[in-house]
Image (spheres, grey):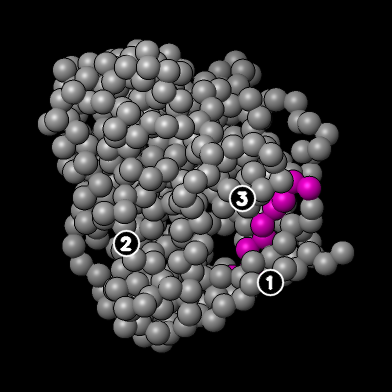
Amino acid sequence: MSIHTISSKSSSDSLQSDSSEFSSPDHLAPAVAGPMVWDRLDAAKYIIELSPREVQDIRAAVIKVKIAGIPRSDIQQDTFDLANPELARRLSLVSKNLHDGQGVVVVRGLDAANFNDEEAVVAFAGVCSYVCPKRATDSYANQTLKCAHFILGHVRDATREKVPTWAKDIGLAGSKITAAMDFHSDRFSGDVLALYVRNDGGSRSGGEQFVASFWRIYNELLARDPEVLETMAEANWPFELKQKDGDPYLEYGPTLFLSKGKPMCQLVKAPLLGTPLISRDQRMPTVTAKQMHAMHAVGELAKRFCTQLDRKQGDIQFINNLSIMHARQAYSGNNGKPSTRHLLRMFLRDPENAWEKPAQFRSNFDDPFTPGRQQNLPIIDTDPWRIISGRESHG
């Protein structure tokens, strides 16, 4: 049985937008400027501290949702009633900072609300609706299942859980293992990555998070090694896409997109190289020497320019998934027990501030936000294998 279902597009298509002046890797965007180009981030500039009154306003909105019996899938600004208009305004301004500012924002203070698991999911969805109104659906992960599309994922340690027979050849997703994750952007998952730190795992347990400006990396490569950017822009990167009930298949595409002068990075190693727990099918083509060099060059610059995120329990972290790369260190539990580290994750889009995507790949970027899909925001993660039954684009 053939595993190669190839959807090949030219590198010039990958760079084009309907109104973009860039048409090939030989005509890369000039160096980018602005607050999204940074070497280091000052925590004082990206952390938004909620006041005790604002925490109570969010808690009151959660209680209203529960009393009214509003399904979690229906949580939006009009159903998550923030009585404080100033708080609503502050949250809406987060999107502006994510798209036109530094690209990283942390909303801090919700730990004081003492939410239970259900309330935390409601609060996460409600707060995010004021930042970016659209939530992405994990359509690929549910293509073979007759259930609602996943909106919210649980980032946690599932390495000690019994693996079902049907999942033995699939492995755990990157969000369920404790290994370190190199710098990456989550491919075609959404414009903005949102993470709610429910449990940081405790002191000295690892799992530190890092962010790096791809725009800063882009400028460095443009000046010193532009061939790396040309390689990234070529639509011949061999992504292996996993399936639950079938062979993996191959999809070619670029890892760098340009539109209206904005570089957008979608470089993720797992579907290109495989991982210790999710091995690459040996029948798949391997990455080229130039592609390996490009991944190494980007990774080394990300380490050079990165900032460790200032993290506290209760934080909601917002990261521009197109311009900011993220990574984490390995983490572990204590005394041979699973780690208690637990983050909630969603991918978002704000139509008002969203960047225009290259025309030939617009459907890939837009698919997670297809209207009308039934949404699933699970309170507890009871099936860490089902989530990767489709494409594995994280980590």
Whole-number angstrom distance, CA of label 1 to CA of label 2: 27 Å
Give the x, y percent position of residue 185: 45, 54
Residue reaching furthest to the right: 1
Indicate the amino acid at tag 2. Answer: Trp
Question: Which residue is found at the position 28% from the left and 41% from the top?
Answer: 131
Is disc 2 surrounded by few (<14), some (14 to 19) or many (20+) residues within 10 Å?
some
Sequence-first disc among 3 and 1: 1
Sequence-first disc among 2 and 3: 3
Question: Which residue is found at the position 68% from the left and 25% from the top?
Answer: 160
Give the x, y percent position of residue 72: 45, 27
| Residue 140: image tag | 3
Indicate the amino acid at tag 1. Answer: Ile
The residue pinned by badge 2 equals 355
Where does the magenta region start and end? 237-245
Q: Quadrant of residue 65?
A: top left
Q: In the structure shown, which secondary structural element does the residue marked by tag 1 occupy?
A: loop
The residue pinned by badge 1 equals 6
Can residue 179 be seen here? The reply is no
Is residue 342 magenta-colored? no
Q: Nearer the viewer, residue 373 or 129?
A: 373
Residue reaching furthest to the left: 86
Give the x, y percent position of residue 154: 52, 31
In-image side of 336 versus 109 (left or right): right
Q: In the structure shown, which secondary structural element does the residue marked by tag 2 occupy?
A: loop
Sequence-first disc among 1 and 2: 1
Is residue 241 magenta-colored? yes
Whole-number angstrom distance, CA of label 2 to CA of label 3: 23 Å
In-image side of 136 versus 173 (left or right): left
